[in-house]
Amino acid sequence: MYVTGVYEKLMMYFGIKGDEYVEPVANMIDYSPKGESASASLKDTIIIADESGVTGLDVEGKWKWNYVYELFEPVLETYNNLVLLTDLGGYSVFAFDENGLLWHMVFDKGIIAAYYDESTKYFLALHNDEDYKTCITVYDVKKGNKPLFTRKFGAYYMTKADISSDASQMAVSGFYQEAGISTAVVTFLRMRDGEVYTTETFHDNIYPYISYLKENALFIASTDQIVRIVRETTASSKMDTEKVIWERNADSTGLVCVNSFRDDYLIAAFSEINTNLVSDTTTSLIRIYNNKGEVVRKIELDGKARGISTGKDTFAVYTDHTVYLYNLKGFLISKFNLVSDIQGVSYLDTRVLFVSGQNQMAVVDMSGK
């Protein structure tokens, strides 16, 4: 372990109670999704999307509500007050809360990806267009999904978007291909008018992940690299920076998953990327970066990390069969094993997780209450 426990010992010395290891209490959910499916949770509700539509269950697995839809490839993303359902390969985006459907939008030419910005309450949709490779439209959810602006890209395939924490700028990332070589693209837009003010390209690379942290610091990531970029919207470029904060080089260890913790930290997991090795025989290194790109914490765990979920004051890392719950000091609060391959983890409460497996689902209480 990279975390030595010094912090916890100091807390105990001064009489301040910190986190203690908690044995998890699991309640198995008796529900079998049909066909292509995705699941997530919000507050006291488990939301499952499959070929029969979208169903809401309570924490005991009892039926709450259902909507009948024909879905191609459902993808669920949990935010503070809603769950966004994007039907990849289809035309629809849905928003649900614990009580059911909030709204539904249809994109005539097809949807590529959708995101929700919690601070501005803006909905970002990357969608197709007949005459352009990609479009992004920003909608104001507070005003009934009123469209604010659309930016069209004729030369780039765009796949990801994020808004800075001060809502002054938006980054849209994607790629273009030339002579069989992919070049990553990150385009920066002013939020006040939707105009592009600069575009950065990265030869022979694609960055599937982008996220803003504080002070307009954008982090872009691929299996081979993490880059921190600052591009201000003003005419002055004194604050503009670009720095590679991690690079794989010839190492067989690559970035396997990454997520932001609010706009304070980037949590990245590194592991063996040789797919011939059995996942459970490998280890993963977790690095926590601040908005300056500095490593503030390192944690080592057993297994190959498959995903990272973040909560109010904790984060969960899951491998094929194990969920680890940590606080930001790197203390292991609890861990839970599932026989089935884990496909996703989301929060029901501060330290209550919904764990979705290939053939199993569980509500796991790690609060110690």
Image (cartoon, rainbow, N blue to C red):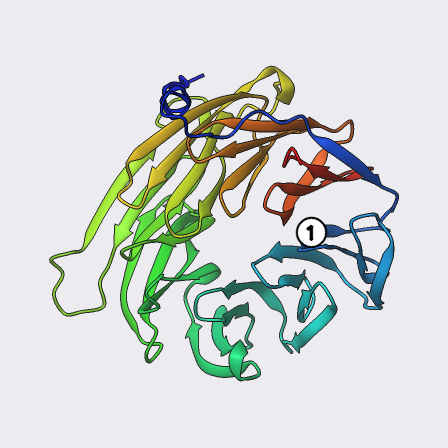
Q: Please report the residue visible at 58 percent of the width from the left and 63 percent of the height from the top.
A: 112
Q: Is residue 110 rendered to the left or right of residue 61? A: left
Q: Secondary structure at mark 1?
A: strand
- Disc 1 residue crowd, few under 14, some 14–19, many 20+, Cα 10 Å: many
In depth, the one of 56 and 367 nearer the eye is 367
In the rendered image, the quadrant that contains the C terminus is top right
Look at the image and tell me whether residue 321 can be seen: no
The quarter of the picture where residue 254 lies is top left
In the rendered image, the quadrant that contains the N terminus is top left
As drawn, 35 above or below 267: below
Q: Is residue 246 rendered to the left or right of residue 86? A: left
Q: Is residue 118 rendered to the left or right of residue 362? A: left
Q: List x then y, in percent, for residue 85.
A: 66, 62
Which amino acid type corresponds to the residue marked 1 in the rendered image? Answer: Ala
Look at the image and tell me whether residue 9 can be seen: yes
How many marks overall?
1
Q: Please report the residue visible at 43 percent of the width from the left and 51 percent of the height from the top.
A: 262
Q: To which residue does mark 1 refer? A: 40
Q: List x then y, in percent, for residue 103.
A: 67, 76
Q: Please report the residue visible at 40 percent of the width from the left and 17 percent of the height from the top.
A: 4
In depth, the one of 352 and 259 nearer the eye is 352
In depth, the one of 353 and 162 nearer the eye is 353
Q: List x then y, in percent, for residue 245.
A: 29, 36
Q: Please report the residue visible at 71 percent of the width from the left and 37 percent of the height from the top.
A: 364
Q: List x then y, in percent, for residue 41.
A: 69, 52
In depth, the one of 185 and 354 nearer the eye is 354
